C-alpha cells in the first residue's frame, strides 16, 4: 500500500501547524523557537497575531520577516491568523475607526403590554431607540441629567410598529397581528386599542445591544465590511510576500468569527431574548422569501404564534446563515484561492452554537463551506476522557455538553471534510489549548486519537509561546523557554500524528449511515440534536457522517446507496423534527421510492418549515416500507438487524471506537479504547478477505496479525488497554517491507515482578540530565504526596538491578502504573519511550541471563510547579511509578 510504504520510509507529509504566539520578541528568540518547532517534527506554523503589539505595523513585518526566513531555510509553511483581536472580524480596528457604517447592524424589538379597549390611545415608543442599560432608573437620581437622554441613539431607526393580541406571556394570536406603523408621530403611536390584552412591538434598526466583546466588529453579512478585512490584513501580506504565496506562505486562518449579536452558545432563534443580525436591505431580502407582508410578522422572531412563528424564523435563519456564508467565508475563500493560498479556520461550535446565532454563524456547513479545510477546535477541557454523559461543570458557569463534544463535534467536522470536494478530505482541529499545565502528552495523545478515529487529519496544537515563562495566557505552552520537562518527548507525539494522518488522508471514509444535520429542524420547531443518534451509533460501532440538507437534496442514489463525493451510505437517519423544508421532504420520498432506507427517529415531521403543504408526501412516507420510524434506543439494533453496519463486535463495547478508511490499494482500520480506566477485550469481524497487519505508528513498525478468514470476512481478537489505539491494515501489497513477529503469540509466559531497593533521583527540565536528591524506596509510591515532593515538576529516575535465570525467546518489560512519560534503559541500552499507557517495552534482544541493570525515567507535567488556574479542572495525577514493574518472559 503506497501510503504505508511512505510512512515506513519516513516520507509522510506534514499535517501539523501549531499556533506560534507573537508578542514582539527579539530576533534570536524567534529563530530559536522556529528551530524548536522544527525539531519537534513539525513543518508548519500558524502565526498567532492576537498578542502582538503592532499587527500589520513595522514591528510586525520585522518579526514576520524573521519567521519567513527561518521557514524558507527549514522548508516549513507559514499560516497567518488574520486579525489583531480575537475573534476574527475586528479588522485591526479599521471598521470602528474609519468605516463605522460597516459595523454590525441589528434588529431590536421593544415589547409593551396594554389592556383595552381605549379609543385615541397613545403609546410612548421613543425609548426603544435607547440602549437598554441607559433606560434603567435609579431612585434619587436627577433623570434630566442621566445618561438616558431624550435624543436616544442617533443612529437607531424605528422601522415598524406592530400590535398583536396576547394569548400568554410568550404567545400572540396570529390572526390579530396588525401593522400600526403609520400611526407613529414624534415617538408616540396613536391608535384605538381594541378590547383585550395587547402587545405593542417596536422594531428598531440599531448598532447597539450585541455582544460586548465584539462591539465595533464588521458586519459579516455585508460584503463591503469583509472587504475592509481583506484590504487591511490580506492585501498587505500579499504585497510583502507575493513570491512566497502558495509555497512558504500557505494561507490565512480565521479564528471563531461569529454573528456576535449576543454572548453565549444558547442563541437559538425564538428561544433567546436577543437583538438579531441585520443589514439595510434585509426587509427586501426577506420579503422575497414569503408571500405575506414580512414586516407585520417580524415580531414572531421573538414570540410564538402557532406555526407561523416557526415559518418566519426558518425564513430568517435560512437567509441570514446564507448571507454569512456568501459575504464572509465565501469572500475570503475566493480571495485566497485567487491568489494561490488557502483559507482555513473554524467557528465556535461550543454547546451546539454551530446551528445558532450569538457565538455561531447560523449553520456549521454553510459557515465553513468556502474554506479549504473543514475546521473545529477543542479548548478548556471540553473533551475529557470518560466525561461524555451530559453536561459537566468546568471552566464555564453553564458547563460543557459532554455528549456534544464527544459524539458530535469531531464527527460534524470530519463529515464536512469528507463531503466537500474542495477540502480534499481534510479536517483540521485546533487542539490542546487552555487545558492548563496539568495537560501532558498522555492526555494530548488521548485527544489526538479521539480526533483521528473520527476522521480529523490536520492539527493546530495550541501553542508555542515565546513570552517569558510562565506565560499565564492559556497554558500549556510547548517548550516554555526550556522549562517544559516534556518538550524533549514532543516529537514522539508529533511523528505519531503525522504518520497516522498520512494513512488517513487521500482515500475514502467507509461508513454505512448518514445522519441528517439538525439546523433547519431547530429553526422550524421542536427538534432533536444530531448527536443523540450519533451517540447511539458510535456506542454500537456503526459509523456515519453528518450530512446537511443541501447535500441530501443535491445528491443522487447509485445502486441503492446515497452517493456523496465518493462516499456511499446505505441509510439516512433523520433526528426527530417537527418540521423540515419541503424540498427535503420531497427528496426523502423520492429516495424511498427508489429503494433507499430512511429512518426517522421517534416520528415523522408534521409539516414543512416554510408552511407549504406536504400532507401528501408525509402520508406516503408513513406508508412506505423503506421509510421507518424507530425509537432512539432501538436505532442501532434495528440497523444491525437489516445488515446496515460495517464491522461486527462480539460483545457490547460502548467505549470502543473505530474508523474505516479505504486507500486505493488497501483498507486501514483504526481502533481506539476511549475508556480511561478499563481495558477492552473483544472479537471483531471485518468484511474483508485479505491478510491483516498491525501498524505501530509510534515505532513505525509492521507486524503480521493472526486472523481467521471465513465466508463472512476476517475475524480477529482485539485487546486494547486504556489510552491504547491500534491500526490494522488489510491488503496484499506489502512486498519489500520488514514484517515483524508479534510478541507472545502462541507462547507461554512467566511474570517476574522486580523487587528490591529502588534508587531514585530527580531533575527539572533545566537540570536534566543532571539528577539530584537521591533517595531509596522498597515499595514504589506516589512521590507527589504532601510529605514528599508535592511541588516537583520534571523527571524522576529509578534504578535497580535484577536477575534472570534463563534468557527467554521473547521478553517484555511492563509498568502497570506510571505518571506519565516513561523512558527506559536496560544494560546501558536505550529501549524506548512511551508517552501513555500501555507502558510495555520489548527487551528481547537486551535482556540477559544473570544480573541486569534497569533505568527508568518518568516525567510529569509542569502542574506540580505551577498549579495554574486552568489546571483546577483536571485531576492532579501522582508523580512517578505506583504500580509494579514486571518482566514478562515468553518461551
Image (cartoon, helix red, strand yellow):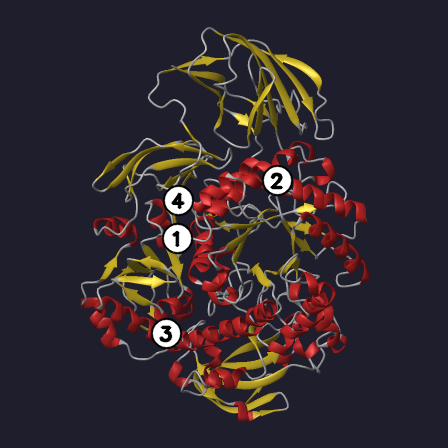
Q: Is residue 635 left or right of residue 222?
A: left
Which quadrant would the N terminus be assigned to in this image? Answer: top left
Between the C-alphas of marks 3 and 1, the distance is 32 Å
Q: Within the image, what quadrant is residue 554 found in? A: bottom left
Q: Which residue is mark 3?
A: 609
Residue 668, which numbered label? 4
Residue 871, which numbered label? 2
Disc 1, SS: strand
Pointer 3: residues within 10 angstroms few (<14), some, or many (20+)? many
Residue 657, which numbered label? none
Name the N-terminal-most of marks 2 and 1. Answer: 1
Mark 4 vs 2: CB contact within 8 A: no
Numbered disc in front, either 4 or 3? 4
Between the C-alphas of marks 2 and 3, the distance is 45 Å
Name the N-terminal-most of marks 4 and 1. Answer: 1
Name the N-terminal-most of marks 2 and 3. Answer: 3
Image coordinates of residue 219 in percent, x first then y, are 62, 73
Amino acid at each position: 500500500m503506497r501510503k504505508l510504504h511512505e510512512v515506513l520510509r519516513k516520507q509522510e507529509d506534514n499535517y501539523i501547524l501549531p499556533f506560534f504566539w507573537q508578542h514582539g520578541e527579539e530576533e534570536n528568540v524567534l529563530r530559536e523557537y522556529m528551530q524548536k518547532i522544527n525539531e519537534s517534527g513539525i513543518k508548519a506554523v500558524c502565526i498567532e497575531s492576537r498578542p502582538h503589539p503592532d499587527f500589520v505595523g513595522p514591528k510586525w513585518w520585522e518579526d514576520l520577516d524573521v519567521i519567513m526566513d527561518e521557514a524558507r531555510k527549514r522548508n516549513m509553511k507559514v499560516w497567518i491568523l488574520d486579525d489583531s483581536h480575537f475573534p476574527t472580524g475586528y479588522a485591526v480596528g479599521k471598521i470602528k475607526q474609519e468605516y463605522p457604517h460597516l459595523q454590525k447592524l441589528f434588529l431590536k424589538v421593544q415589547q409593551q403590554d396594554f389592556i383595552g379597549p381605549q379609543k385615541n390611545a397613545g403609546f410612548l415608543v421613543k425609548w426603544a431607540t435607547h440602549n437598554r442599560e441607559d433606560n434603567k432608573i435609579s431612585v434619587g437620581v436627577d433623570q434630566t441629567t442621566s445618561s438616558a437622554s431624550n435624543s436616544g441613539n442617533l443612529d437607531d431607526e424605528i422601522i415598524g410598529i406592530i400590535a398583536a393580541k396576547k394569548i400568554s406571556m410568550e404567545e400572540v394570536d396570529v390572526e390579530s397581528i396588525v401593522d400600526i406603523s403609520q400611526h407613529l408621530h414624534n415617538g408616540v403611536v396613536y391608535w384605538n386599542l381594541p378590547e383585550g390584552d395587547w402587545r405593542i412591538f417596536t422594531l428598531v434598526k440599531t448598532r447597539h445591544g450585541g455582544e460586548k466583546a465584539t462591539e465595533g466588529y464588521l458586519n459579516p453579512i455585508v460584503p463591503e465590511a469583509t472587504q475592509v478585512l481583506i484590504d487591511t490584513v490580506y492585501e498587505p501580506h500579499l504585497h510583502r510576500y507575493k513570491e512566497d504565496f502558495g509555497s512558504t506562505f500557505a494561507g490565512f486562518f480565521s479564528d471563531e468569527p461569529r454573528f456576535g449579536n449576543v454572548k453565549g452558545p444558547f442563541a437559538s432563534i425564538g428561544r433567546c431574548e436577543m437583538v438579531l443580525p441585520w443589514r439595510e436591505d434585509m426587509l427586501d431580502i426577506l420579503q422575497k422569501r414569503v408571500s405575506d407582508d414580512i414586516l407585520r410578522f417580524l415580531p414572531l422572531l421573538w414570540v410564538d404564534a402557532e406555526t407561523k412563528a416557526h415559518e418566519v424564523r426558518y425564513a430568517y435563519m435560512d437567509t441570514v446563515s446564507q448571507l454569512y456564508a456568501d459575504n464572509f467565508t465565501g469572500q475570503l475563500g475566493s480571495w485566497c484561492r485567487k491568489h494561490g493560498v488557502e483559507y482555513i479556520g473554524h467557528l465556535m461550535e461550543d454547546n451546539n452554537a454551530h446551528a445558532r446565532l450569538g457565538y455561531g454563524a447560523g449553520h456549521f456547513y454553510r459557515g465553513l463551506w468556502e474554506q479549504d479545510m473543514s475546521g473545529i477546535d477543542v479548548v478548556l477541557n471540553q473533551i475529557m476522557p470518560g466525561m461524555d454523559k451530559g453536561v459537566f461543570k468546568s471552566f464555564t458557569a453553564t458547563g460543557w455538553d459532554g455528549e456534544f463534544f464527544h459524539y458530535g463535534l469531531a464527527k460534524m467536522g470530519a463529515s464536512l471534510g469528507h463531503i466537500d470536494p474542495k477540502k480534499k478530505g481534510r479536517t483540521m482541529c485546533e487542539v490542546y489549548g487552555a487545558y492548563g499545565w496539568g495537560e501532558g502528552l498522555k492526555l494530548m495523545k488521548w485527544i489526538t486519537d479521539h480526533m483521528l478515529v473520527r476522521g480529523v487529519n490536520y492539527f493546530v496544537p495550541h501553542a508555542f509561546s515565546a513570552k517569558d515563562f510562565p506565560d499565564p495566557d492559556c497554558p500549556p505552552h510547548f517548550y516554555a523557554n526550556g522549562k517544559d520537562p516534556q518538550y524533549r518527548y514532543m516529537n514522539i507525539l508529533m511523528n505519531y500524528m503525522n504518520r497516522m494522518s498520512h494513512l488517513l488522508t487521500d482515500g475514502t471514509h467507509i461508513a454505512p449511515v448518514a445522519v441528517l444535520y439538525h439546523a433547519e429542524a431547530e429553526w422550524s420547531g421542536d427538534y432533536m440534536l444530531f448527536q443523540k443518534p450519533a451517540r447511539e451509533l458510535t456506542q454500537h460501532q456503526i459509523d456515519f457522517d453528518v450530512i446537511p440538507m443541501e447535500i441530501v437534496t443535491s445528491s443522487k442514489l447509485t445502486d441503492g446507496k446515497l452517493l456523496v463525493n465518493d462516499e456511499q451510505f446505505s441509510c439516512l437517519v433523520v433526528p426527530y423534527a417537527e418540521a423540515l423544508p419541503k424540498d427535503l421532504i420531497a427528496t426523502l420520498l423520492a429516495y424511498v421510492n427508489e429503494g433507499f432506507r430512511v429512518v426517522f427517529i421517534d416520528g415523522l415531521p408534521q409539516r414543512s418549515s416554510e408552511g407549504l403543504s406536504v400532507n401528501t408526501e408525509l402520508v406516503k412516507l408513513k406508508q412506505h416500507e423503506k421509510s421507518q420510524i424507530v425509537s432512539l434506543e432501538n436505532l442501532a439494533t434495528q440497523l444491525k438487524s437489516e445488515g446496515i453496519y460495517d464491522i461486527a463486535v462480539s460483545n457490547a463495547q460502548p467505549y470502543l471506537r473505530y474508523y474505516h478508511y479505504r486507500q486505493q490499494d488497501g483498507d486501514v482500520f483504526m481502533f481506539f479504547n476511549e475508556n480511561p480506566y478499563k481495558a477492552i477485550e473483544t472479537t471483531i469481524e471485518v468484511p474483508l478477505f485479505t491478510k491483516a497487519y498491525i501498524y505501530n505508528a509510534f515505532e513505525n513498525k509492521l507486524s503480521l496479525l493472526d486472523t481467521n478468514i471465513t465466508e463472512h470476512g476476517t475475524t480477529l481478537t482485539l485487546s486494547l488497554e486504556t489510552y491504547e489505539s491500534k491500526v490494522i491494515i488489510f491488503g496484499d501489497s506489502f512486498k519489500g517491507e520488514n514484517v515483524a513477529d508479534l510478541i507472545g503469540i502462541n507462547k507461554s509466559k512467566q511474570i517476574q515482578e522486580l523487587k528490591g531497593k529502588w534508587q531514585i533521583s530527580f531533575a527539572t527540565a533545566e537540570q536534566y540530565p543532571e539528577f539530584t536528591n537521591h533517595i531509596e524506596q522498597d515499595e514504589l509510591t506516589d512521590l507527589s504526596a504532601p510529605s514528599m515532593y508535592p511541588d516537583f515538576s520534571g523527571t524522576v529516575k529509578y534504578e535497580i538491578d535484577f536477575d534472570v535465570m534463563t534468557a527467554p525467546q521473547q521478553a517484555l518489560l511492563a509498568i502497570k502504573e506510571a505518571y506519565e512519560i516513561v523512558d527506559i534503559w536496560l544494560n546501558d541500552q536505550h529501549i524506548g519511550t512511551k508517552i501513555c499507557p500501555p507502558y510495555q517495552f520489548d527487551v528481547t534482544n537486551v535482556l540477559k541471563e544473570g544480573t541486569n541493570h534497569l533505568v527508568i525515567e518518568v516525567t510529569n507535567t509542569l502542574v506540580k510547579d505551577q498549579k495554574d488556574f486552568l489546571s483546577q479542572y483536571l485531576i492532579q495525577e501522582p508523580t512517578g511509578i505506583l504500580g509494579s514493574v514486571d518482566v514478562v518472559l515468553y518461551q
